[in-house]
């Protein structure tokens, strides 16, 4: 697949500039635009034989089509280029790179550290490649809260209260399902805050454990999570926190 499969076409400009072309010449010109767009330097070779092969005509036929079709191209250094097409590709490449950087900043925005007692805590990280001398506000630390109690079901549904904690058995279920430990702890931070803030009927659930299972599965699909593939977290801190939760669950049995 080409690096940028979609070719932007400025329809008004195209129609205005190519009204004199026959239908056959339109097809040839569009194919050349596509071949140039797919090339690494957005250009065409200065070779009649290769150009004829690109558009699917004989050498003789190409010689009759070339005068009207190649008038839109500039020949320099053994290649045909088109200024507008080149500028459009550069703009698309820049937008793609900007989107990639923004995505990296979003996914690198959370990490886990240890507090003074050795517990794993989550905080919002800094930007990608921060300025070395810049000052940033102290990150807010949020403890991963768990309980060994079982969340009871209610036939009419219940809300998640701000003081509610995720049962250790829920964490262990996610680990038993082979989800990444870091992802589990990240979502364990987000889940209580999110649902405690949801008002209306959307915040009422009949089975919160099922809601948690769906939450984890959705998070894994969203990030295309694979074991060992979550970045921006202290894995040793996560492992220690998971061990504490595992031991807490065992002591309850």
Image (spheres, rainbow, N blue to C red):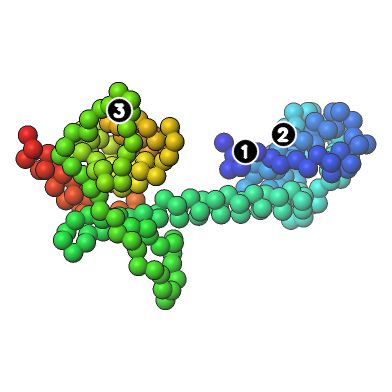
Point out the tag, 1 or 3, that comes first from the N-terminus.
1
> Residue 116 vs residue 67: left or right?
left
Dot 2 alpha-carbon crowd within 10 angstroms: few under 14, some 14 to 19, many 20 or more: some
Disc 1 is placed on an element classified as loop
- Give me the residue at 75% from left, 40% from top: 9
Q: Which residue is mark 1?
A: 5
Vertical arrangement, residue 228 with respect to residue 203, above or below: below
Closest to the observer, 115 or 128: 115
The label nearer to you, 1 versus 3, is 3
* Alpha carbons under labels 2 and 1: distance apart: 17 Å
Q: Position of residue 14 (x, y in %)?
A: 83, 41
Disc 3 is placed on an element classified as loop
* Alpha carbons under labels 1 and 3: distance apart: 44 Å
Q: Which image quadrant for residue 212?
A: top left
Q: Which residue is mark 2?
A: 54
Point out the tag, 2 or 1, that comes first from the N-terminus.
1
Q: Position of residue 133 (x, y in %)?
A: 42, 76
Work out whether residue 181 can be spotted: no
- Give me the residue at 25% from left, 27% from top: 153
The label nearer to you, 3 versus 2, is 3
Point out the tag, 3 or 2, that comes first from the N-terminus.
2
- Give me the residue at 37% from left, 58% from top: 124
Q: Quadrant of the N terminus?
A: top right
Disc 2 is placed on an element classified as helix
Q: Which residue is mark 3?
A: 207
Residue furthest out toward the front = 156
Dot 3 alpha-carbon crowd within 10 angstroms: few under 14, some 14 to 19, many 20 or more: some
Dot 1 alpha-carbon crowd within 10 angstroms: few under 14, some 14 to 19, many 20 or more: few
């Amino acid at each position: 697949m080409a690096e940028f499969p979609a070719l932007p076409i400025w329809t008004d400009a195209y129609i205005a500039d190519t009204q004199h072309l026959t239908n056959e010449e339109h097809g040839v010109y569009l194919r050349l635009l596509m071949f140039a767009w797919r090339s690494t330097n957005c250009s065409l070779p200065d070779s009649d034989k290769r150009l004829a092969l690109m558009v699917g005509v004989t050498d003789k036929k190409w010689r009759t089509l070339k005068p009207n079709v190649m008038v839109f191209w500039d020949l320099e250094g053994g290649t045909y280029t088109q200024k507008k097409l080149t500028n459009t590709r550069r703009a698309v490449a820049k937008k793609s790179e900007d989107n990639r950087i923004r995505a990296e900043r979003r996914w690198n925005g959370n990490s886990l550290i240890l507090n003074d007692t050795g517990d794993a805590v989550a905080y919002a990280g800094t930007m990608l490649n921060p300025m070395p001398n810049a000052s940033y506000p102290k990150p807010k630390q949020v403890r991963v809260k768990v309980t060994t109690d079982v969340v009871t079901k209610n036939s009419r549904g219940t809300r998640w209260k701000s003081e509610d904690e995720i049962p250790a058995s829920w964490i262990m279920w996610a680990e038993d399902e082979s989800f990444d430990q870091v992802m589990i702890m990240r979502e364990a931070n987000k889940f209580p805050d999110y649902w405690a803030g949801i008002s209306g009927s959307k915040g009422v659930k009949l089975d919160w454990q099922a809601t948690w299972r769906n939450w984890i599965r959705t998070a894994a699909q969203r990030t295309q999570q694979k074991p060992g593939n979550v970045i921006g977290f202290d894995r040793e801190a996560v492992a220690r926190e998971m061990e504490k939760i595992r031991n807490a669950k065992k002591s309850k049995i």
